[in-house]
Image (cartoon, rainbow, N blue to C red):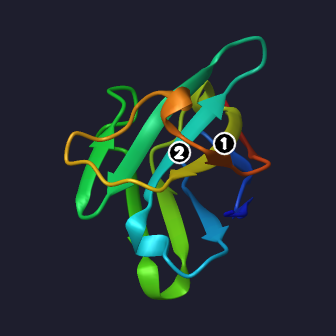
Amino acid sequence: QVQLVESGGGLVHTGGSLRLSCAASGRTFSSYTMGWFRQAPGKERDFVATVSGGTTYYADSVKGRFTISRDNAKNTMYLQMNSLKPEDTAVYYCAAVRALSDRGYYRQADYDYWGQGTQVTVSS
């Protein structure tokens, strides 16, 4: 069982930056593929980014602005978000699955564990 806790959300103006963190419990963090998803009001939960081993993948909407990373020694994953836009406003969720893939995992159904979410609001 893995528990995930997100932090770092908040309110920021257009063009600003935020860094989200996802702290994971357990002793085999490096064996997990980690991902970020987001859900805007009235919309489905969408893929944002994933890191599996040393491989990263991004949704087209965030490519070049967001950077996913992980620190296995700290059991923590990060999402650095730059050049934020109002359309980035959403609840951001981290997710984990105990598997590694060089093709990445993009679907919610691929993940077994989820955090409670952290709100990101970008004002125009």
Q: Amino acid at mark 1?
A: Tyr
Q: Earlier in the sequence, mark 2 or mark 1?
A: 2
Above/below status of 108 relative to 51: above
Q: Tell me residue 49's x, y (percent).
A: 41, 42
Task: Answer with left or right where residue 35 lies relative to residue 92.
Answer: left
Task: Identify which residue is drawn at 49% across, 57% down.
Answer: 79
Q: Which residue is mark 1?
A: 92
User: To which quarter of the image does residue 106 belong?
Assistant: top left
Q: Tell me residue 100's x, y (percent).
A: 32, 54
Q: Quadrant of the N terminus?
A: bottom right
User: To which quarter of the image does residue 104 belong?
Assistant: top left
Considering depth in this image, is 31 or 63 the residue closer to the camera?
Answer: 31
Q: Which residue is mark 2?
A: 36
Decide: marks 2, 1 in contact (CB < 8 A)? yes
Camera sees residue 122: no
Task: Answer with left or right where residue 82 lies relative to residue 60.
Answer: right
Considering depth in this image, is 83 or 54 the residue closer to the camera?
Answer: 54
Task: Identify which residue is drawn at 47% across, 27% down.
Answer: 107
